[in-house]
Each structure stands twice: as structure tokens, then as C-alpha cells.
Image (spheres, grey):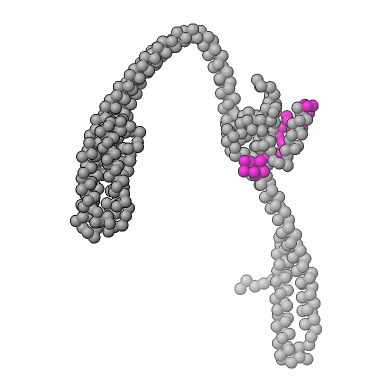
Amino acid sequence: AFVVLVAALVFVVQMGGNVRQQIDSLATANSDSTQWSLAQVDVELLALKAAISAGETTPEAELGEVRRRFDVLCSRIGTVSNSPLYTTLRQDPDATEALARINSFLADAIPLIDGDDNVLRNALPDLADRTEAIRPLVRQITLKGVNVLARDADTQRSGIADTLSLVSALIAALLLILLVVLAMLLHYARRARDRAREEGLVRSRLASIVATSLDAVLVVGRDGRVIEFNGAAEIIFGYARDEAIGARMEDLIIPDHLKAAHEAGMARYLETREKHVIGKGRVKLEARRKNGEVFPVELSISTAQSESGEIFVSFARDISHRVASEQELIKARDDAVAGERAKADLIAVMSHEMRTPLNGMLGTLDLLDPNQRGPKDAAYLDIIRASGQQLLHHVDAVLEVSRAEAGKIDFAQEVFSIT
């Protein structure tokens, strides 16, 4: 333990040095960024002058670039005038006066910039002179700002370095105190460590069993609130573990039409210890997912004792697919029975309601004497007879197929020539 603490002390000292270097770099980066932003004021002023000169030399040129550059310069000056980063700069009297004069120039030029193009074009020469007049003021602010910001950065880095040195000293003192305390607690820690290891192994095994269970595991207290909610329960019921822990079980997974029965059963058990579902093995019930879907589950509930008293351990399995398969099999059986019944009805119709009238019609046609009919009527009778015989042949074929499927076909023996 002493070696570990010494190593920790060395690590803390090294970490303090690394943090100091990082803060120095960060402070330098912030200072450089602030100084760069300040230097951009001078750059934007030159860009504005260049845009004004272009507008003067090219009368038909658009004035949008002049306006844009003026707006950018206004934004830069506004940052210097209002940003907390430049508070130290604004405390300098010369810088304050220079900023006031620059802001006065900008305020006077705004009506021209926002005015008509012709008015602005005619005022470009005067605007160029006034822009050139404030250039020394901008340069003065830039140079003074760089000096002020550099001085502040140095002061800031020095303060940070002192603070880190103090923090390192305090950490070293704290570690020394911890060494003393550690020596006092080492004896008690050694005894508690073995006991904690054994308890940890037991908890780890139980947690692994619950976490890897394929069934949803819900542990509920006597008050009906969820104490444990494993990964399978998250998948089956759609609730995250954080959502489920502490919530009432009936509000999570019990369907509305079963809530009254659940509450009555729990009240009866707590009062009389009478068990209907608890300890009865696997029973089929319905549960509800987070999205409101009600689905069938196979549920097993048992009780156990914990530090907080009696708890209820529930194992639930989603049997939606199994129930759906059973329903599909039942439906397929019913469809097959209905198909066989329809087929039998069709065979009965063809055997009686169709073949009997056909035989009667064909028999009646045979009774008609074609010699007593004209050629035209005889032709019609031949057509009716041929059609009836063809239809009777189809009916007989269907009935023959039905007899073959039933295994009741009679094979006829006839003499025929193979040539």
C-alpha cells in the first residue's frame, strides 16, 4: 500500500506539471486569439479603404462591398468596445479616447452607408478622407491592445502557475495524511476484504444468472414496486431498466382488464397468505408492453426473503410466437376441414343435382324420333345430345377422381389391341 501511495504522489506531481503546461498553452492560445481579433480591426479598416477607392475609380461599380466592409469594421469595433476580453484595454485613457473618436466616425457614416447609392457615391471622397483620418487611432488601439493583452496574459500565467504549485503542495500534504489514516484502517480493511470478496462472488453469480436469463426476471417488493429488472425484461416489455426500477409493476406490465384481479390477489395473499398464482409453477396469462400491446406470457412467481423483507421473484416468457403458431395450426385445420366439406358438397351436387338431370335430358332426347323432325331440328337435337354427353363425361370424370382419392376406384378389364 505504501508503494502505491508513493507512486500516486509521483503521479500527482507529474500531473500537476502537465496541467501547468496545458494551462500555459491554453492561456497563450486565448491571448493569441484575442490579439489576432484586435489586429483584424486594422485589416478591416484597410479593406474598407480599398473598397471606397474601388468605388471612386469605377463609377458604375456596385457599392455593396463598401457597405459590407463598413459593417464588418463596425462589428470589430463593437467587439473591442463591449467584449469583456478588452476590459483592461478600455481602462486605458488613450484607448478610451481613440475608441470614442472611432465610434463617432462610424455613427456619422451610418446615414451615408444606409442611404441612397447616389448620395453614398458622391460622398465617397469625403468618406475616404475621414477613413484615413481614423487610421492612426486604429493603429494606436491595436498596438496598445497587444501590449495590454500580453501583459495580462503573463500575469494570468503567473497566477495559474502559483495556484498549481499550491494545489500540488496541498495534494502532497493530503496524501501524507492519507498514509496515516491508511495505516489505521489497514487492519480493519484486511478483515472486511475477505468477507466482501465472498459476498461479492455470491452477488456476482446471482447477477450473472439474472442478467443472462432468457426469461424476463422481475423482482418486486411487498409494496408492488420493481426492485430488479433484467435485460430480457427490457427486451420483452420495452422499458429501460432505469424506467422500471421503483415503478409499480401493475403500472408497467399488467393489462387494464387484469389490474383489478391482480390487486385483489395481492391483497388476499398479504392478508391470508392464500396462493393462487404464487408457487403454482408456470401459468399462462397476458401482459402489456410499453407501447400498450397486450401479449401472452408464461409466468412463474415465487417468494423469497431479503434484507428489506419478503420479495416476489417473477420469471416471464413471451409466448406470442408459440400462441400464433398454435392459432395458425388451428386455422389450417379448420380451413382443411372446410375445404373437405366444400369438396364433399360439390361431389354431392355433381352426383345428384347435375348428373341426374343430365341423364333425364339425354334419355328424353333418345325418345325423340329424328325421322319425324326436319333437318334443322335434327341438327339442333344432335348438338344438344353431344353437349349433354360431353357435360356428363366431365361429371363422371370428377366423380371418378373423387372415388380414386377415396381409394374406391374399380379397375375395368377390357380386351384391346396394342397394334
Residue 289 within the magenta-colored segment of the rendering: yes
**Image quarter of the C terminus:** bottom right
Of residues 218 and 54, the one drawn nearer to the viewer in this rendering: 54
What type of secondary structure mainly makes up the magenta span?
loop
Can residue 292 be seen from the camera position used here?
yes
Query: Residue at the spot x=63%, y=41% of the render?
Result: 289
Residue positioned 20% across, 48% down in the render: 129
As drawn, 397 above or below 243: below
Q: Is residue 116 left or right of residue 364?
A: left
Q: State which quarter of the image contains the N terminus.
A: top left
Q: Residue furthest left?
A: 57
Position in image of residue 158 (x %, y %): 30, 22
- In this rendering, the answer to whether 273 lies above or below 178 is below
Image location of residue 105, percent across then percent down: 27, 44
Front one among 394 and 337: 337
190 part of magenta stretch: no
348 left or right, relative to 247: right
Instruction: Tell me what residue is drawn at x 69 percent, y 24 percent.
Output: 310
Q: Is residue 45 above or below residue 340?
A: above
Tell me residue 389's x, y (percent). 72, 77
Toward the viewer: 343 or 313?
Answer: 313
Location of residue 316 (image quadrant): top right
Provide the residue span drawn in magenta: 271-295
Image quadrant in which you'd find residue 340: bottom right
